[in-house]
Structures are given as structure tokens and as C-alpha cells.
Image: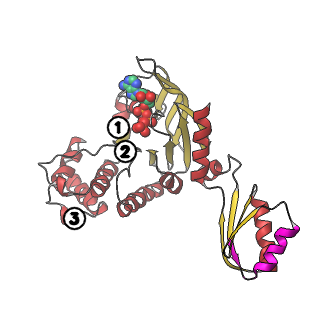
Amino acid sequence: MTEILKIENLTKIYPNGVKANDNLNISVREGEIVGIIGPNGAGKTTLIRQVLGLLRPTNGEIKVFEEEISKSPHIVRENINYCPQNILYFPSLTVKETIEFALKFKGLKNELLSQKVEEVLKGSELENFKNHAGYMLSSGMMRLLLLNIAIARDTPLLILDEPTAMVDVISKTRIWERLSQLRSMKNKAVLIASHDMNEVKSLCDKVYIIVRGKIIAEGSPEEISTLMKMPVEITFIPFDEEKVEKVFEYEKSLGFKKEYNVFNVIFDELNKGINFIKEVNELAGFKYLELEAPSFEKTVVKLLEEGEKK
Ligand SMILES: Nc1ncnc2c1ncn2[C@@H]1O[C@H](COP(=O)(O)OP(=O)(O)OP(=O)(O)O)[C@@H](O)[C@H]1O
């Protein structure tokens, strides 16, 4: 797959001495949704502003389709669309006029413009709101609208800064569905900066975790979930409590808690937990069973905590 964006050894030191990005290497290829996670102040916005050519790097290179953006600024305008964190709209325009304005600004006109306006209205499920003023939309509707405008502009790379911040769960799901559809368009790519672990886990093919300007981990959400040794917790209600208590008596090394008829036991490895489940199932059977394996979210939180300590 062709590489759309390549960031090499990117460092940004602000005039006040803050090193916001420290030797970052990032790659975004066609067909990929790539996530950037980091706590507040990690350097995500600084990174995006440099990719958009709004901020000059202190060191390193940013290439779009192999062209260095400082040498060919047009390459950014032609290939990248950006949805900012803060919602921007024009209070005096209707929804339809907002879409027309945004797309005309990008050079669309006549029949293609009308066709794209209809596509955006449909994609945002706002056909019935097209003559409403923009301020009447909820923040979720507005975000979905801005995302669809960005998609209609049809650039190879879409950069989204916290696309679902402050939106309700229904709008969030719609935005995620719309973004997932982009994956099927093999020549497109999306770079998302986000604080939402569920968002990153369900959407992204690859994730970079940034702390204090540095990448501390990268890989698919599945790979990241295996980076730290995390405990496995099993909560269950057996059909036969006495038999289970005998297992614990026999294997004294297994610490367990029991509250009413609910047992809870923690293992340091997934395999040990699975063997225990098999054993209890044969012996006593389960009325209820819950296994909490190392989740992406817990692993990322632990990675961030470790990263902050360094
Ligand atoms: N114009 C600036 N001048 C000096 N320091 C800055 C400037 N902009 C950002 N910083 C500092 O650079 C660091 C990274 O900031 P940045 O806004 O890129 O982080 P972020 O990951 O986007 O944070 P958030 O999640 O809160 O948006 C922070 O320490 C911030 O205070």
C-alpha cells in the first residue's frame, strides 16, 4: 500500500523551550486508520499543526506522497483534509448553505457541487434539516456534518482531532460507522488524535502512544494489549460451591475472595486462568462466568502511567 504520510525524526521545540514533539516517526498508508493517543499536553495538536504546515518543525521531515511539505506546501492542500477539535460554523447560514460554502471553497461548482451537497446531507442524515440554521444542530449532528464535508472533499488523507469529543453515544456510533466505511475505500487513510480508547480500539489499524512528546509504544490495538503483563480476573458463580471450595483448599496458592455465592480469583497469566475455568467447569459447572482479560484500555493506561514516571 502506498505511503501517504511519512514523518521522520520530527522534533518541535517552542520558543519557550518546551519540547512538544521529540523525534517522532510515524507512517500512514492507504487504507489505514491510524490513531494517536496521549494525555493532555502530550503533543498531539503540535504534531497535527506541523503536518498541516501551520507550524515549522525544529527538526525532522514531513513527507506527503514522498514530497517534503516545506518545499511543496500545495501538497498538503491537495491531499489532506482536517476536522479540528473545536466546532466551527456560520450562524447566519443554513445547513445546506454551510455545505455549499465549504465545498465551493474547495473549488467545486455546478453539477458536481449539487451532487456532493446531496451526498453530504444524506451521509449526515440531515436531509430534513437542510434549511435549518446551523446553530440549531446538536454538537453530535454538527460533528457528523463536518466529517461528511471533509469526506466529500475527497482527499487521500483525513486528519481528525478528537472527532467525537463532547458528543452523545448515538452520534458517536454514527461517526464511527461513517469512518469505518472509509476503510473500504482502499485509497483513503485517516489519522485520528483521540482520548477515547474505545474509539481507537474499534477503528484503528495502528496506534501510536505519545507521552511528553515521545512515542512510547506503537502497533495494532491487539499488539498493544499484549505489551504489559496484566492480571486476569475471573468472577463466577458455580452450581456446586462446596466442590469449588475444595479446589481452593487443595491449591492453597490460589488466593480467592467469596462474597455470598460469587467467587473472584486473579491469575497472573491468561493460560492459568483458562486452565482453572476448565477445571471448575468439569468439577462444579458454572451458573455465571466472567473473565476480564488484559484490555486495550487498561494496558494503555498502564503504559501512560509508566511513561509519565520516566
Ligand atoms: N504555542 C506554544 N508555545 C509554547 N508551548 C506550547 C505551545 N503550544 C503548546 N505548547 C506546549 O506543548 C506541549 C504539547 O501541547 P499540545 O497542545 O501539542 O498537546 P496535546 O497532546 O494536543 O494536548 P491536548 O490533548 O490537551 O489537546 C504542552 O506542554 C503545551 O503546553
> Viewed as shown, does residue 117 lie left or right of 179?
left
**Mark 2 vs ligand 1: CB below 8 Å:** no
Work out which quarter of the rendered image holds the C terminus and state it: top right
> Viewed as shown, does residue 249 lie left or right of 257?
right
Above or below, 144 relative to 287: above
The alpha-carbon separation of the residues under discs 1 and 2 comes to 7 Å
| Farthest left residue in view | 92
Q: What segment carries the magenta color?
A: 236-250
The tag on residue 78 is: 1
| Farthest front residue in view | 260
179 part of magenta stretch: no
**Residue 74: % across, % down:** 34, 30
Residue sitting at x 75%, y 54%: 268
Residue carrying label 2: 155
Residue sitting at x 51%, y 34%: 6
**Residue 52: % across, % down:** 38, 33
Residues tagged 3 and 1 counted as in contact (Cβ below 8 A): no
133 or 75: which is nearer to us?
133
The alpha-carbon separation of the residues under discs 3 and 1 comes to 29 Å
